[in-house]
Image (cartoon, rainbow, N blue to C red):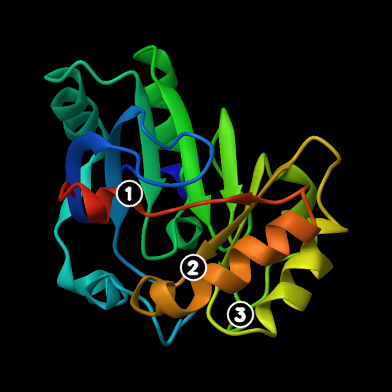
Amino acid sequence: MNEVLKKTVTLPVMEHFYTIQGEGFHQGKAAYFIRLGGCDVGCVWCDVKDSWNAEKHPQYEVGTLVKEIKKTAAKLVIITGGEPLMHNLDALTKELKAAGLQTNIETSGAHPMSGTWDWICLSPKKFKVPLPEIIPLASELKIIIFNKSDFEWAEKYAALVSSSCKLYLQPEWDKSAELMPMIIDYIKANPKWELSLQIHKYINVP
């Protein structure tokens, strides 16, 4: 095993759990989430700021994570964060795929791609923009709408992703009541976009 993979046999894990995917293209599907510690993007509205410092979270062996997943009926595994691509994910996805599991990642795209993925959700952030080489890999573009200028940000990246990429606008949770009418009007005027909601927060699951 090369030196890069030796360093990634363990990963800092903030939490891992089996639940329902609450947002985006796979909304409503059963999924096992692995939330990795470490993030340098720094979104001011981030709802998992405890994930930012990777050193706060225990290291898990990749094999241990796969064993935990296999205790459930999960077929879909979503790697999120933090910013998961701060870590080399080749070893993790190799074992997940060997176990017959679907691999999804949620990323800002601010770090180089690693791992083998069935679905890539790109959610670019103004605080640290995505690497150009990540953008055409996106299966799904999810833009968090925090203020009116974010629609222009959304269109910038919609023009850069592939023609098959799904396009989603998602209100920032704490401002959703204020933003929702604006987002609905925008989608009606620009029907290439779809609405993404954090339904897990409505149905009270992780």
Which label was assigned to residue 199?
Answer: 1
Q: How far apart are marks 3 and 2 (CA)?
A: 19 Å
Residue named by callout 3? 128
**Which residue appears at 81% of the width and 51% of the height?**
161
Query: Residue at horizontal 20%, vertical 46%?
Result: 203
Of tags 3 and 1, the one toward the viewer is: 1
Indicate the quadrant where residue 31 lies: top left
Say above or below: 159 vs 176: above
Q: Position of residue 75 (x, y in %)?
A: 34, 18
Q: How many residues crowd mark 2 within 10 Å: few (<14), some (14–19), many (20+)?
A: many
Q: Is residue 115 visible?
A: yes
Crowding near pointer 1: few (<14 within 10 Å), some, many (20+)?
A: some
N-term mark: 3 or 1: 3
Q: Work out whether residue 165 or residue 89 is closer to the camera in this orientation and state it.
A: 165
**Of the residues tagged 3 and 2, which is closer to the observer?**
2
Q: How many labels does the image show?
A: 3
Q: Where is residue 67 in the image (x, y as percent from the top left)?
A: 16, 24
Give the image location of residue 122, x and y in percent.
61, 54
* Disc 3/disc 1 C-alpha distance (Å): 27 Å
Q: Which secondary structure lies at badge 2?
A: strand
Between discs 2 and 1, the one toward the N terminus = 2
Q: In front here: 96 or 162?
A: 162
Whether the residues at callouts 3 and 1 have beta carbons within 8 Å, the answer is no
Q: Regarding mark 1 in the picture, which secondary structure is present there? A: helix
Judge whether 149 appears above or below 142 on screen: below
Query: In the figure, is residue 31 to the left or right of 26?
Result: left
Indicate the amino acid at tag 2: Pro
